[in-house]
Image (cartoon, rainbow, N blue to C red):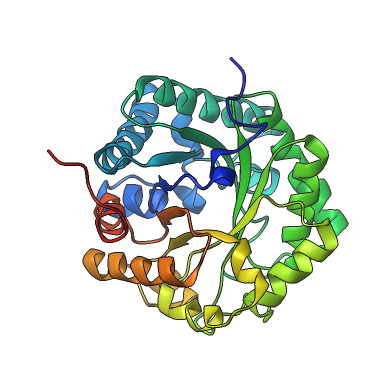
């Protein structure tokens, strides 16, 4: 089977999409599954783990079906890169197999989800280091070389695109976009912000997007913001700057805690799903091209349903 949408993402045509919520926090705190280093990809190595992932995605797809929206399936591979894999005892050959298996699972889910269309499959890439802080200093060239390996594993699969999430420095973002472009994969880049609306390295969000576009020739299909509560970055959006048109998706945290506070938290802070849904309705009014709605830390299917209810009308029963 070949990728369905790699040549033209339906997001480009303005189709509205849901995506999933905080996969790792859901599995750890709500389902009691141990995920060392916050890595969900090892679940792909067992039938039980694959069923857990399938059930998680199907729960979210049902919400998209209820609201007549498309869906983006993000592979559970945020930690499935060389450095994190080494720490978890996986050689590059293991990681190549597991990244491909992740897309195979999502392709099966897509084929069975007849009530939702379109469904886009994204190969999910995470930061080389801790996404909460710029702790892995790389040049753009070094970042390109690093991320090219995982992006390359996705090329020969049914993945329609690749997406990098929780990126904390412009150099790493630029390197990822260049790696994806070189591989011929549509690239989506999601930066994270601190409570002041700046990247963890101190770069203002708008400057980060403008610099990334300048250094990559505008090669990213679009940008997203993730792993921050809307209160943390909303003020950065209060302008009429052109870069706002480049933000097409948000995957916010349920909690208003800072990254440092989340790191220390021993219990999940799920926030208020209904309130977060209203936050997304406000973001929809502020971002003219917002078309991908999902969650990050602390969110689950309840938050996604609240977003859909606040931003789109559900189909009549």
Q: Toward which corner of the image does residue 13 lie, by quadrant?
A: top right
The picture places residue 71, in percent across and down from the top left corner, at 42, 40
> In this orientation, does residue 99 appear?
yes
The picture places residue 97, in percent across and down from the top left corner, at 62, 25
> Where 161 falls versus 133 (above or below)?
above
Left or right relative to 216: residue 159:
left
Left or right relative to 176: residue 139:
right
- Between residues 114 and 59, which one lies in front from this camera angle? 114
- Quick one: which residue is furthest to the left in this view? 317
The picture places residue 284, in percent across and down from the top left corner, at 42, 65
- In the rendered image, the quadrant that contains the C terminus is top left
- Between residues 209 and 68, which one lies in front from this camera angle? 68
Q: Residue at x 38, y 22 (%)?
A: 47
- Between residues 145 and 91, which one lies in front from this camera angle? 145
The picture places residue 39, in percent across and down from the top left corner, at 50, 46
- Quick one: which residue is furthest to the right in this view? 141
Left or right relative to 161: residue 215:
right
> In this orientation, does residue 171 appear?
no
Q: How many numbered badges does the structure rendering display?
A: 0
Q: Residue at x 70, y 33 (%)?
A: 92
Q: Residue at x 70, y 29 (%)?
A: 155
């Amino acid at each position: 089977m070949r990728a369905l949408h790699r040549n033209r993402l339906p997001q480009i045509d303005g189709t509205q999409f849901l995506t999933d919520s905080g996969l790792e926090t859901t599995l750890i705190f709500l389902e009691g599954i141990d995920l060392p280093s916050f890595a969900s990809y090892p679940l792909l190595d067992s039938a039980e783990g694959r069923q857990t992932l399938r059930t998680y995605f199907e729960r979210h797809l049902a919400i998209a079906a209820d609201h007549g929206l498309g869906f983006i399936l993000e592979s559970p591979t945020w930690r499935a890169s060389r450095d994190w894999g080494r720490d978890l005892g996986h050689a590059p050959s293991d990681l190549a197999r597991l990244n491909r298996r992740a897309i195979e699972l999502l392709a099966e889910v897509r084929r069975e989800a007849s009530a939702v269309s379109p469904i886009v499959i994204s190969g999910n890439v995470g930061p080389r280091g801790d996404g909460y802080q710029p702790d892995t200093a790389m040049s753009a060239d070094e970042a390109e070389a690093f991320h090219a390996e995982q992006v390359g594993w996705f090329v020969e699969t049914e993945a329609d695109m690749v997406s990098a999430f929780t990126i904390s420095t412009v150099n790493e973002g630029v390197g990822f976009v260049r790696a994806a472009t070189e591989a011929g994969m549509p690239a989506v880049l999601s930066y994270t912000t601190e409570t002041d609306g700046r990247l963890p390295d101190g770069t203002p969000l708008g400057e980060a997007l403008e610099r990334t576009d300048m250094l990559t020739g505008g090669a990213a299909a679009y940008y997203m913001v993730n792993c921050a509560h809307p209160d943390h970055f909303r003020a950065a959006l209060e302008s009429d700057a052109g870069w706002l048109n480049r933000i097409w998706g948000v995957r916010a945290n349920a909690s208003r805690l800072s990254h440092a506070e989340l790191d220390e938290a021993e219990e999940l802070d799920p926030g208020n799903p209904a309130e977060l849904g209203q936050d997304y309705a406000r973001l929809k009014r502020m971002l003219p091209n917002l078309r991908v709605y999902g969650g990050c830390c602390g969110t689950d299917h309840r938050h996604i349903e609240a977003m859909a209810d606040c931003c789109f009308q559900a189909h009549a029963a």
